[in-house]
């Protein structure tokens, strides 16, 4: 079924943020603070997997990239600048409209589509990313299976999501949303997924995890990669 993993209330919540998505001081300010570290991790995995050098300006030249749950394009645009032919998919049509407008304003050609993994049925990509998305879908098993089907032979997948721990509840919901750093209603702690659960989901879809790295944020040190997986984490996977 098309759009089978979309939670309508989640799509509405994020769609309501669309107009402010590219404002670094607006409701999506936290995403802007996190993005450099997210991009740094992603670039390191790209370089390792595809045999690139960190000095290369366009390490994804000749590659197709998919960002599932792309919002208004904060990750799609850097992927395009790395040389990829990029497709971005998001559950909220408002985000897709904002993404198209922003890409056009900076001269980037990105294929944006509203929907879920069904929007790319039958297509395959060398790089599949989905950052802070799986905790918002209705059926994580079906969602991961859809991502796996979209991954080309020899491709690379990178996901990130909050861990379901007391620390994540305190940091992201009690403090983050409570103090207004994150829009209220962004997170549902019961939907958070542990690294063990995500690894099992990926394994069930025919993928194997080749790297798991923690992702942390605090007001004093900012965003950073860490050995601790207790707040948030990245998982990189390839075909088993």
Image (cartoon, rainbow, N blue to C red):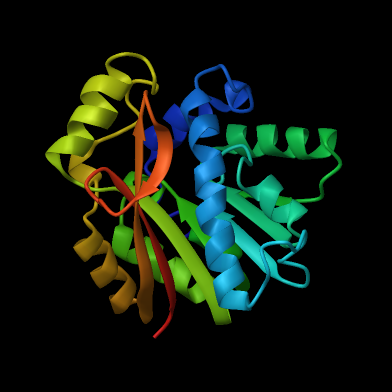
Tally the numbered discs. Answer: 0
Q: Is residue 214 visible?
A: yes
> What residue do we see at 25% from left, 29% from top?
171
Residue sitting at the far left: 166
Question: Quick check: 105 above or below 239?
Answer: above
Please indicate whether residue 1 sits to the left or right of residue 127 in the image.
Answer: left
Could you tell me residue 46's position as x and y percent?
Answer: 59, 67
Please indicate whether residue 183 sits to the left or right of residue 165 in the image.
Answer: right
- Asked whether 231 or 55 is in front, the reply is 55
Residue sitting at the far top: 179
Please indicate whether residue 17 sits to the left or right of residue 88 in the image.
Answer: left
Could you tell me residue 78's position as x and y percent?
Answer: 68, 48
Q: Can residue 28 be seen in this view?
A: no
Could you tell me residue 98's position as x and y percent?
Answer: 67, 32
> What residue do we see at 68% from left, 37% from top?
99
Residue sitting at the far right: 107
> What residue do we see at 50% from left, 44% from top?
37
Question: Quick check: 122 above or below 170?
Answer: below
Question: Quick check: 81 above or below 105?
Answer: below
Quadrant including the C terminus: bottom left
Could you tell me residue 173's position as x and y percent?
Answer: 25, 27
- Asked whether 203 or 141 is in front, the reply is 203
> What residue do we see at 21% from left, 63% from top?
197
Quadrant including the N terminus: bottom left
Q: In which quarter of the image is residue 168?
A: top left
């Amino acid at each position: 079924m098309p759009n089978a993993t979309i939670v309508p209330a989640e799509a509405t919540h994020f769609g309501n943020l669309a107009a402010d998505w590219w404002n670094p001081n607006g409701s999506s300010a936290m995403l802007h603070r996190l993005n450099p570290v997210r991009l740094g991790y992603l670039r390191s995995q790209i370089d390792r997997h595809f045999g690139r050098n960190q000095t290369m300006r366009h390490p994804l030249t000749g590659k197709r990239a998919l960002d599932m749950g792309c919002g208004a394009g904060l990750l799609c645009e850097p992927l395009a600048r790395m040389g990829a032919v990029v497709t971005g998919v998001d559950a909220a049509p408002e985000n897709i409209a904002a993404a198209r407008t922003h890409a056009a304003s900076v001269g980037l050609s990105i294929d944006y589509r509203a929907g879920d993994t069904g929007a790319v049925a039958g297509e395959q990509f060398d790089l599949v990313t989905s950052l802070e998305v799986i905790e918002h879908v209705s059926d994580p098993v079906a969602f991961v299976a859809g991502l796996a089907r979209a991954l080309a032979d020899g491709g690379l997948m990178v996901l990130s999501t909050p861990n379901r721990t007391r620390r994540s509840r305190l940091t992201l919901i009690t403090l983050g949303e409570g103090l207004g750093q994150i829009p209220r209603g962004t997170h549902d702690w019961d939907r958070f997924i542990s690294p063990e659960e995500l690894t099992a989901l990926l394994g069930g879809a025919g993928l194997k995890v080749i790297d798991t790295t923690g992702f942390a944020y605090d007001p004093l040190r900012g965003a950073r990669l860490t050995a601790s997986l207790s707040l948030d984490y990245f998982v990189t996977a390839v075909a088993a």
